[in-house]
Structure formats: structure tokens, C-alpha cells
Amino acid sequence: MKTLTLSLTAALLLSACATVPSTDVGALHGRTLTLDTHIDIPLTYMTEIDPTGETELQVDLPKLMAGDLDSGFWIVYTPQGELTAEGYAAAYDIAKTRMDAITALVTTHTDNFELAKTAEDVERIVAAGKHAVLVGMENAFPLGHSAATNNIDWWAEQGVRYVGLTHFGHNQFGDSSNPHPERDSGPKWNGLSPAGRDLVDQLNRAGIMVDVSHTGKETMMQAADLSRTPIIASHSGAKAVADSARNLDDQQLEKIAEVGGVAQMVALGAYVKLPTAEQQAARDALDAEFGDRNTWSQATRDAYMERRALITAMAPEATVMDFVDHIDHAVAVAGIDSVGIASDFDGGGGIVGWQDASETENVTAELVRRGYSESEIAKIWGGNLLRVMEAVEAEAAR
């Protein structure tokens, strides 16, 4: 069952301010159903890496238990490639590898993990003392070029419960918030493509949430208007707090609230707190040196991340307090019913105080310190997302 321990870091966060309410954060965290909407996995997951033991990953079973993180969306991520038959086929292979790994997790380690396909499943699995595993697809690129190739029903049967329309670079379904520097010269579709509009309809029909993280603003606004169900931004920040191209501006936050959706604030340092001018210059030079990341080997990726860490260390890193600034802003703009939490662990996420799943309670501690009530914290930590899931399920059942 859920643990009720108060971590040392959480205690330090609470003691940092004399006006903190006398709340037992550990007990409150233990009572709260916690749901992280973005947990990435490597391609070697469940083959070379056993996530039930101690690993170098930010999310494994010991860390989930230590941080009392109940549930999450394990991610079928595909980097953006060429919009060709060969590109779609290669992307499908990557997506299938990750989907197979998630399936292996929930079928092999049944004592600790169970696949959740509905909001009710999540609550039932967590109440039984296991971790609820949901599936999100980051980048719709592997779905192919049309409804004839999407095979949405198959992905839904596997457990996919949200699909991110784009990633870095425009794809066959719409424009990205971050055009590819070589393939893209300005907008490609001025929002959703015809295939993207059809995809939104298919997702509604299949009971899969439409995810607008990584989409361009026009893509996002059109998807919100077109979808018959509330949309989500599975892992995005607030642009007013950190002016990144992939964060959401106030108009976008308001739109998500208007359609009954939820914006999951992301704990990825580069989008929580902007780099200094010196850091940005160093990052730009590093990116230019290493080139297209879609062509990297694992050794190249490791070398890049080692160099990137040195650049990050040039200035104070983003903290849990910086992260909750995004939550505060999103709540002020969109309302308490339209904000949630995503770590982006093992996909670049991690901030001081929430470096991996074992430190999850520290986020709850900071929310308590800011004066959020227990019911509000429950909404932010998962209640809002589960409400959207229920609405999407209801539409699919019509």
C-alpha cells in the first residue's frame, strides 16, 4: 500500500518558511493518488534493463516505492523522421519496440504493475497497492500517413490512452512548436493537416486523449476546437514563467480550460527555468557540433549529455520551487481544475528536489507550503487528468 514517510528534503522544504501550515505532508502525500503523465523508457527496457531493481533510470520500482508515486503514463516515443514510407516504417518499429516493453512490464511483473485502460482501473489498481501503468504515445508520426494506415483501434487495445500529435519538427498531422532546423522552413500546414483533423476524430472515437504538448499554437487551438472531448497537454510549462517555444501561453492555457482539458506542468529544467545567455550560447554551439540527434548512436547521446551537464552546471539549476511557480501561474490562468503534473523522467526531466521518482513527495510538500488544500493537491496530482479520461471514455462509448 502507499507509504506515509516524510523525506528529509520535504521536511527541509517545509521548514524553509515559518508560515507553513502544520500539515503532516507524508500522510497527505500517502492519501493522495499521484499520477505522472510522462515517464520515458529506453529502447532496452525489459530486455537489458529490469526496472524492478535498482537502475540508473529515474523511474524504477524502488524509486517509485520510495517516492510513493502511484501511477503514470509510460511513453511510446518516436523521434521525428522523414515523411516517407520508409520513415513511417522505421518509426513504427521504434514505437512497437517500446509498446512491447511496456506490455512485458505489466505481464511479467504482475505483483507490482498492472496496465490501466480506464480512470476506474487506475483507482482500483492503486487501491490494491500496485502501480498503475498507462500508455501515452509521444509523436503520432509512426501512425503513418492516413486513416488507412493509422490502426488506431489496435493501439487503443494495447492500452494507448493519449497521443501527442507532433514532436520536434512538423509531421504529417500538423505543425510543431519547434520546427526542424533543416527540414522545416516556416509552417507546413498552418495548424492541423487534413490527416491531422481526421486523426483527432479517430482518437475521439477510440477513447484516446488528444495531446497537444509539442504542437504549434495554431495546431493546438484547432485541435481544441475540433475535438469532441477535452484535450490535454501531457508535459508542458507556462510560457509566462519561462518563455520557451514549447511552453503554453496564457491564451492556450485559457483554451485548455475552456474545453474542459488539463495542462500538465513539466519538471524539465530547460522549460522550467530559462538558461542564461552564456548557457544558451554554449548549448547552441554544442547542438551545432553534434548535429541531428535522430542520427545519434547511444555513445554519441551519452557524450552529448555529459557535455550538456557541464553547461547546466554553469548556473543554478531549476528547483521544485521554480517548478511550482509554473503550477501557480497555470492555476491562476486556467483554474484549479485544469492543471496537473508531469516529470518527463528519463526523457530529460528532473529538477533540484525532484531528480527522480524517489523524491516525488517533495512536490507535494511545496504545494502544501504554497497553501494548496488537500483537495486541490489531489486534483493537481491526478484528479483532473482522471476526470478528462472519464470524459473521453464516455464519448467513445456513445
Image (spheres, rainbow, N blue to C red):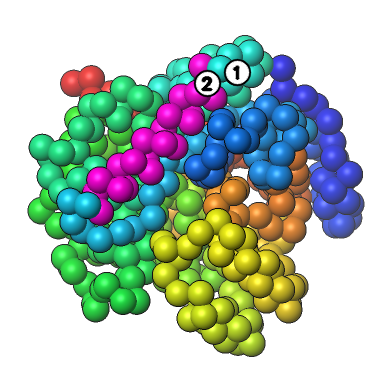
| Residues marked 2 and 1 touching at CB (< 8 Å) | yes
Is residue 40 inside the magenta stretch? no
Q: Which residue is mark 2?
A: 106
Secondary structure type for disc 2: helix
Depicted 373 relative to depicted 207: above or below: below
Q: Position of residue 274 (x, y in %)?
A: 59, 74
Secondary structure type for disc 1: loop
Is residue 102 inside the magenta stretch? yes
Q: Read off the magenta span.
A: 87-107
Q: Amino acid at mark 1?
A: His
- The residue at the point 85 percent across, 40 percent down is 7
Depicted 144 relative to depicted 61: above or below: below
For disc 1, the neighbor class at 10 Å (few under 14, some 14 to 19, many from 20) is few
Quarter of the image holding residue 328?
A: bottom right
Q: Main secondary structure of the magenta part?
A: helix
The answer to whether residue 325 is left or right of residue 360 is left
Q: Amino acid at mark 2?
A: Val
Q: Position of residue 210 (x, y in %)?
A: 30, 43
Q: Which residue is mark 1?
A: 109
